Image (cartoon, rainbow, N blue to C red):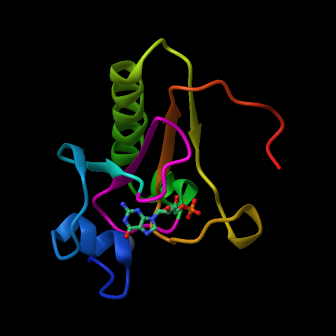
Amino acid sequence: MSQPDPDCLFCKIVAGDIPAEVVSETEHTFAFKDINPEAPTHVLVIPRRHEPDIGSLAAADPDAAIALLNEAKSIADQAGNGSYRLVFNTGADANQTVFHCHGHVLAGRSMSWPPG
Ligand code: 5GP
Ligand code: ZN
């Protein structure tokens, strides 16, 4: 099992050292409301283990990656009408700002494509 990163914001949220509005907790995942919501439902689903992005999580712990996808769907199902967006910003050029893997579950409004 990987160790938490003492400098990682989301590791601190998983540990309860920084408060968050928790949406769900499972063996592999932790989900909480985004502090700056971009949609009526905007939940961050993260693995408990520290990995910087979804690709490294899938390589290091496939069960956790699958659990994250299943939990994202479960949260989206609770949100509304079946339409949702699951976003993994990966890398600084893609606007990743927190380097602990997280999927944004966005739902509750119509959305445009392509993203900017
Ligand atoms: P990224 O840009 O890395 O894909 O997404 C990071 C997300 O984390 C942003 O949407 C931002 O609003 C959210 N965020 C940053 N700091 C906090 C925090 O302390 N608490 C919560 N709940 N969300 C945060
Ligand atoms: Zn972390």
Q: From the viewer's perspective, is 38 left or right of 27? A: right
User: Is residue 80 found left or right of 4 in the rendered image?
Assistant: right
Q: Is residue 48 above or below residue 87?
A: below
In the image, is 88 to the left or to the right of 35?
Answer: right
Q: 85 or 51, which lies in front?
A: 85
Q: Residue at x 49, y 49 (%)?
A: 37
Residue 10 visible in the picture: yes
Quadrant location, the N terminus: bottom left
Which residues are the magenta region?
35-52
Q: Residue 11's x, y, as percent?
A: 30, 72
Prevailing secondary structure class for the magenta stretch in the rendered image:
loop
* Residue 39 in magenta stretch: yes
Q: Position of residue 95 (x, y in %)?
A: 69, 65
Tell which quarter ligand 2 is in. bottom left
Residue 97 is covered by the magenta coloring = no
Indicate the position of residue 108 as horizontal and vertical percent values: 51, 26
